[in-house]
Amino acid sequence: MKKDIFITGLGMISPQDSLKAENSNGFVKLKDFHCMEPDYKEFIPPSKARRMSRILKFSYVSAKIALEQSGLEKPQMINVATGLGCLKDTSLFLQDIILSNESVLKPTPFINSTHNTIAGLLAITYQTKGQNFTFSHTEFNFEHALLDSMIRMQEDNISDILLGGVDELTEETALIKKNLQMQNQGEGAAFFVLSENQTKDYYAQITALGFAYELDTEAELNQAVMSFLKTEGVDPEEIDILVSDKDLSAVFSPEKQIIYTDFCGDYMTASSFGLGVAALEVKYHQTPVLMINQNNKNSYSFVLLGK
Amino acid sequence: MAEQRIVVSGMGVVSALGNHVQAHLDALRTAKHGISMTNYLETIHKDRFPVGEIKHSNQELIALLNLPEGAYSRTELLGLFAVRQLLDSVNYEMDNRTGLISATTVGGMDQSEHFFEDYLKGLNLDYARRHPLGESTEFMASQVGIKAFRTTLSTACSSSANAMILGARLIHQGVLDKVIVGGVDALSKFTVNGFNSLMILDKEHCKPFDNERQGLNLGEAAAFLLIETEESARKAGRKIWSELKGYANTNDAYHQTASSPEGDGAFDAMNQALQKAGLQMSDMDYVNAHGTGTANNDLAESRALQRLFGDDKIPFSSTKAYTGHTLGAAGAIEAVISNLCINHKFIPASLNCKNPMEEVDIFPETTMIEVEKMDYILSNSFGFGGNNSALIFSSVKN
C-alpha cells in the first residue's frame, strides 16, 4: 500500500519575497541573487541568534515557517541537503589557523563548520530524535534527500519529515564561481514539511521522483520524460506547468514554463527552491506540475506533483 | 513478502594499518597499531599529537594509482585507492545499476587549506574545485565508471555508517541493485586544529574506555564495501562476508558537539538497530564501540551500553587506538573490521585500556580473543550534531 505524501508546510528564504508567499506570481527575474533576509528578531530569540551564522539563520527561520504552516510541533526525522555547507565558518576557521599560525583558536567556527550543524541545530530545536541525515553532494543532493524522505515514509512508520535544502553566497563562492561552473550564483533555503496526512492548507502531493542519467540529446531527454510520466500513469497532456532550472521548451512544452533559476540563481541546492515554486504553482492553479533539473553534465531528475 | 537479505560481498580499505584488507586482519590479530607522529602533514603540531597516518605521500599514491600528474586532493586519492581495491578483489564489472554512496566530513580540505591564502588573492583557483564534499565522490565515480546514482553524506563521524544505511535502503526499494558504500577522510591541518581547539586530542597514544583517557588521536582512511542482495551476490559467485542485518540512525537532540550524559541517542540507535534486526543485545557476540578516547564520548557510550547489556556480559572494544579516529571513514572502516571479526572469529583488543572507568561497571576486552562463535556484531558510530548510528552484521554461510 503506497502512502500519499503531502507538502503541508513550506518556508523559503530566497532572493525573492518568498518567505510567506502564497504563489509565485510576484517572483521576478533578477541579476543579483542575494537573499531578501527577514528581520531575524521576529523569528529567533536574541540569545540564540547571536550564536547563529547566516546559513543557520536561513535554515532556522525557513524550517520554523514550514512547521508553523503544517501545524506540526515536532517532525519525526530531518533530512537536509547542502552543497557547500557552512562555508563561512569553514573560512573563518581557516583564516584563524593561518593568522594565528595554528596557535590561538576558538572552537566555535570549527564546530559550526561541520556540514551537519544545520540538521543538528534543528534536531535540538525541535527535539527530533529520529534520523538526521545531511546530504552534501554537488548535484541532486536535494533530490537525494527527497528520495530518502519518500522511502522512509513508505518503508517505515514515519508520518512527518522536515526536509530542506540550503546554500549561501560568500566571498569564497564568488571567488571560485568559475570553478563551480555557476555563472549566476544564487543562494537560499527552502524547507518543507512532508506529511502522510493532508492539512486544510496543504500545498501539493509529491507523486513521484525519478532520475535519468547520460542523456546526450534532446530526443533522449524527451523519451526519458515520457517514460517517467508513463510509469506514473500520467498523460503528458495533463501537465500544464513545467518548472525547470534551464529552458527546456524544445524538449517538453506545456502551457506554462517557469525557469526557476531566473528567480534564485544557480546553487547546489537550487532545486529545493524549484520544488517550492512547483508546490506554490500546484496550490494556486490546482493542476499537476512537472519539475525537471539538469546537472552540469547530462543527468536529470524529475519530480511530479499534483493536488 | 519478506525483505531481501542485504549482504556485504566485497571490501577495500586503506588506513594507518596498511594498504589492504589482509594488513588490517594481521594488525588486529597481533594487536599492532598504526599510530605515530606525522610524516606528511604540514602542521606546527606535528611533534605534539600522534596520528593514524597512511604511510604514503600523495605523489606515491598518484603513482600507485597510475594517475596522470595533476591536482588531486588526498581524499580523492585515498578514496579511489580503496574503491579500486574493492572492485579488483571481486573482479567487478561495472554496470548502470551500481551506485556509489560516499561519506566525508572535510572532503578536499587538505587542498583547500593549502591554497587558501592563494584563493583569497584569486590565485590557484583550480584547487578550489575540490572543496565541495561531492567532488571526491564524483572523482571516484568517474574513475571507476559509475555513471548513474552517486551521492555523498556528511553527518560528521557517523557519516559512513549512514552511507551503509542509505545504500541498504536503496537496494530494498529497487532503486539500485548494488551499491559501493563507505567513506574517506584525509588528515588535515583543519581537523587537527579543530579538535585541538576543542581540547580533545591526546598527546599520547589514545586510551579508549580507560579512566585516565585524555582524548582522541586523529586518523585518515578510506574504506568501501560492496553491498547487494544475497541472491545477487550468490549469482555472481562472490564471497559473502556478512549480512547487514540491522541499522538505525538517531539524534541525541542535546548539544552540537557533546553527547547527552546518559548517551540517550546512542542507546536509541543501538536499540532501534536491534529491533530492525529482530535481535536482543544478549544475542550480540561482540560490540565494536565508537570509543574515541574522549571523556565525553566514552562515558556516554558506556552508560548506553551498560543500560543495554543489563546483567549480561557482552564483549566490546574500541579499535580507534589502531587506526586513529578517521572521522567520515570511521563507520566504514569499523564495518570492515566487524566483517573481519565475523569471518575470522576473533575479538580485537581495546589497546591502552588499564583502569576501569569509575562511573560504570563495564570494561572492554583488552587482549585479542579467538572465539568459537561470532555470529552477531553491533558496530557504533557517533558524531557531532548529536548524530548516532548503529549497524548490525550477522554471519552467513558461504
Image (tube, grey):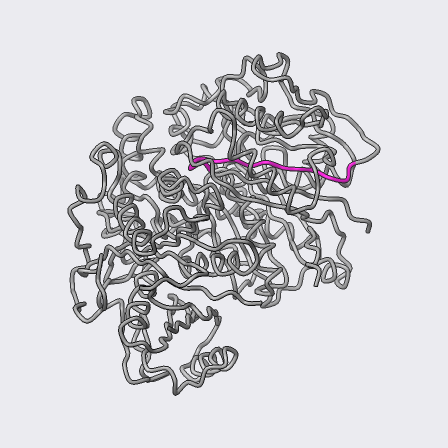
Compared with A177, B11 (above or below) is: above
Task: Give the image location of residue B350, x and y in percent.
Answer: 65, 23
Dominant SS of magenta comes to: strand
Task: Please say whether residue B385 is one of the residues in the magenta stretch.
Answer: yes
Q: Position of residue B87 (x, y in %)?
A: 65, 55
Residue at image location 38% in from the left, 50% down from the top:
B132
For the residue pair A231 and B176, the one nearer the viewer reads as A231
Left or right: B339 in relation to A66? right
**A220 magenta-colored:** no
Quadrant in which the N terminus of chain A is drawn: bottom right
Compared with B196, B185 (above or below) is below
Q: Which residues are magenta?
A: B374-386
Tell me which residue sits at (29%, 85%) in the image: A255
Which residue shows up at 30% across the image and 50% down it? B125
Where residue A217 appears, as percent x and y from the top left, is 42, 81
| Residue B345 vertical placement versus B134 (above, below) | above
Number of on-image labels: 0
- Asked whether residue B55 appears in the rendered view, the answer is no
**Residue A177, quarter of picture:** bottom left
Give the residue drawn at x 73%, y 44%. B394
In the picture as drawn, the residue positioned furthest to the front comes out as A200
Decide which of B276, B382 is in the foreground and name it: B276
User: Does residue B221 appear in this view?
Assistant: yes
Identify the image quadrant of the C terminus of chain A. bottom left
Q: Quadrant of residue B280?
A: top right
In the image, B347 versus A104, the foreground residue is B347
- Most extreme residue toward the bottom, as rendered? A237
Residue A251, image x, y percentages: 37, 83
